[in-house]
Image (spheres, rainbow, N blue to C red):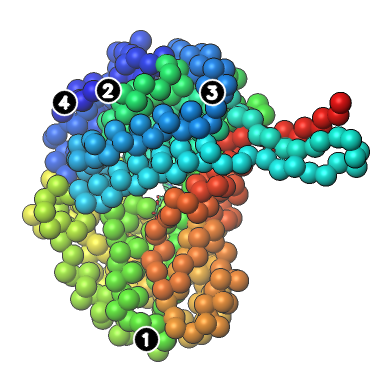
């Protein structure tokens, strides 16, 4: 199925595209050209959600009885379809949330790779044989699915994040109900269309669009939903944790970051500059793993700052569909205003603006902001503490590596971090002492690999891990079996 521009995105329930009972719609608009409506997203009701959960519950009984390799065959088909539609899905993503077309194509290809990885997981072991104290007994572990899993996702990775949650949920025998972010719901619907066209049994996958306060909250409260996997802001994550605990549902949260890069005196200057730019400003800084704090040792500070400035001045901002654009707009007006207000706070609190800070000339209509560099940033400043989720880098000077590590760890978040150094001792100190779930050496802070566990420490996560083989821990329960004749 294909959607035309400006079409209403229907819910996907019991294998059918379904209109909401409310008839209320919100536009999903192109942040590069805000007068352009990419699609109309339904403000669904709790009745719509209930229909999806009821259908998911019924479908899950048969789905879990299929062998895992048979479930994997569906995921392989979805991956093939996603790949066949790669350009169309990527273009929709760029038009809907602004990331550049090459990045959107890369993300869609990543979605197909994730599906294939989890299709393969359907062929791998799920338990262990454990010696019993009874020599005539056989004791082993197996795993069972949770049942129905509610999937609540943000707008910044509209293909990869829903897929890295849905694919493991499905391979281990769960049914899923997806609530995508409204800003990326057209792209999400195109992903769901691949499941539909792969003929996944009706009810195994559902999608209900709508407001976080209604459909998101509805997922938190629904007694038919056994597990909730969420990626998004800390504020919403905490609401989910409270609600899930209150009714005994399993939950998993991946949230914000304030990710540091440390540039040591002995760093390869060019490598550190390029990685800081890529890690901090690609996708307009809207990655949970984006570099935000740049902690630089005094011996290299001036040279690093000068080179960074020269390179940032060369970045081309524009519509992500135009060839040559390096950075697109913020995903929404809301996001743009948030970024601009953090820039104002930085100035008010005494940081020095090195570059950017406003809307780029000639791009007044879209939700654009210039790539922005702040110098003389102090640890107490808001731009050194809070997640901005925009293309803003805060430079902070330190004398020693110990100081750098202390500053890097001075955050309530702990998602990703990187260091640039040639010294093995500095690398090991960073690996051992950095409080982050993803630490990278001589590489940018962003860059998640689908076969490796991903998640944060401190307030970045509920301390579980997504992706790779770690995903099995959330999407299943262990059952210990003891058999005796
Ligand atoms: N750690 C990670 O893996 C990761 C990845 C991507 C984004 N993020 C984080 O996501 C945030 C940006 O995304 P966002 O603005 O879409 O986040 P958000 O928390 O506003 O929204 C995320 C999802 O939650 C829904 N939601 C909103 N209110 C809700 C409520 N009361 N109950 C239930 N659901 C509700 C939204 O509709 C959306 O689908 C940033 O903080 C970023 O760091 C984290
Ligand atoms: O926004 C969170 C995901 C980040 C990611 O996928 C990456 O850094 O590759």
Residue under label 4, please give it. Answer: 4
Residue 151, placed above or below residue 371: above
Q: Which of marks 1 and 3 is nearer the N terminus?
A: 3
Residue 410, placed above or below residue 482: below
Dot label at residue 300:
1
Q: Is mark 2 on a helix, strand or loop?
A: strand
Give the spatial CA distance, label 2 vs label 4: 10 Å
Along the line of sight, the residue nearer the viewer: 45 or 469: 469
Q: Which of marks 4 and 1 is nearer the N terminus?
A: 4
Give the spatial CA distance, label 1 vs label 3: 59 Å
Q: At 29% from the left edge and 67% from the top edge, which residue is drawn?
A: 277
| Residue 395 as seen in the image, left or right of residue 451 | left
Residue under label 2, please give it. Answer: 9
Along the line of sight, the residue nearer the viewer: 340 or 71: 71
Give the spatial CA distance, label 4 vs label 3: 35 Å
**Marks 2,3: beta carbons within 8 A:** no
Q: At 30% from the left edge and 45% from the top edge, which residue is drawn?
A: 109
Q: Where is residue 394 in the image (x, y as percent from the top left)?
A: 37, 68
């Amino acid at each position: 199925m294909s959607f035309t521009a400006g079409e209403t995105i229907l819910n996907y329930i019991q294998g059918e595209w379904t209109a909401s009972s409310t008839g209320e719609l919100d536009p999903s608009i192109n942040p590069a050209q805000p007068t352009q409506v990419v699609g109309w997203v339904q403000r669904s009701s709790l009745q719509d959600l209930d229909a999806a959960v009821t259908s998911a519950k019924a479908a899950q009984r048969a789905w879990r009885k299929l062998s895992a390799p048979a479930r994997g065959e569906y995921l392989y088909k979805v991956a093939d379809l996603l790949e066949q539609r790669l350009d169309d899905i990527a273009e929709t993503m760029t038009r809907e949330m602004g990331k550049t077309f090459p990045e959107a194509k890369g993300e869609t290809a990543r979605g197909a790779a994730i599906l294939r990885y989890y299709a393969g997981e359907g062929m791998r072991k799920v338990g262990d044989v454990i010696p019993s104290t009874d020599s005539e007994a056989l004791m082993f572990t197996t795993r069972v699915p949770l049942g129905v899993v509610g999937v609540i996702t943000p707008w910044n990775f509209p293909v990869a994040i829903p897929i890295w949650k849905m694919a493991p949920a499905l391979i281990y025998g769960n049914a899923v109900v997806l609530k995508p972010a409204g800003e990326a719901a057209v792209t999400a619907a195109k992903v769901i269309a691949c499941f539909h066209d792969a003929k996944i049994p009706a009810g195994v996958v559902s999608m209900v669009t709508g407001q976080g306060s209604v459909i998101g909250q509805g997922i938190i409260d629904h007694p038919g939903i056994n597990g909730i996997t969420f990626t998004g802001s800390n504020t919403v994550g905490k609401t989910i944790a409270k609600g899930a605990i209150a009714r005994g549902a399993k939950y998993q949260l991946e949230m914000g970051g304030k990710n540091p890069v440390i540039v040591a005196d002995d760093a390869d200057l060019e490598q550190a500059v390029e990685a800081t730019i890529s890690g901090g400003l690609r996708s307009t800084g809207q990655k949970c793993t984006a570099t935000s704090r740049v902690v630089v040792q005094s011996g290299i500070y001036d040279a690093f700052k000068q080179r960074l400035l020269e390179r940032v001045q060369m970045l081309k901002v524009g519509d992500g569909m135009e060839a040559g654009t390096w950075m697109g707009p913020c995903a929404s007006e809301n996001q743009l205003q948030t970024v601009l207000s953090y820039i104002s706070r930085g100035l008010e609190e005494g940081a020095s603006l090195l570059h950017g800070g406003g809307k780029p000339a000639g791009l007044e209509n879209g939700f654009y902001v210039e790539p922005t560099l702040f110098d003389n940033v102090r640890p107490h400043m808001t731009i050194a503490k809070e997640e901005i989720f925009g293309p803003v880098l805060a430079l902070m000077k330190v004398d020693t590596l110990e100081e750098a590590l202390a500053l890097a760890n001075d955050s309530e978040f702990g998602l990703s971090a990187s260091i640039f150094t040639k010294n093995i001792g500095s690398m090991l100190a960073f690996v051992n002492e950095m409080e982050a779930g993803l630490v990278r050496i001589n590489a940018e802070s962003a860059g998640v690999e689908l076969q490796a566990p991903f998640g944060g420490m401190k307030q970045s996560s509920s301390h579980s891990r997504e992706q790779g083989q770690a995903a099995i821990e959330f999407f299943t329960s262990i059952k210990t079996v003891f058999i005796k004749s």
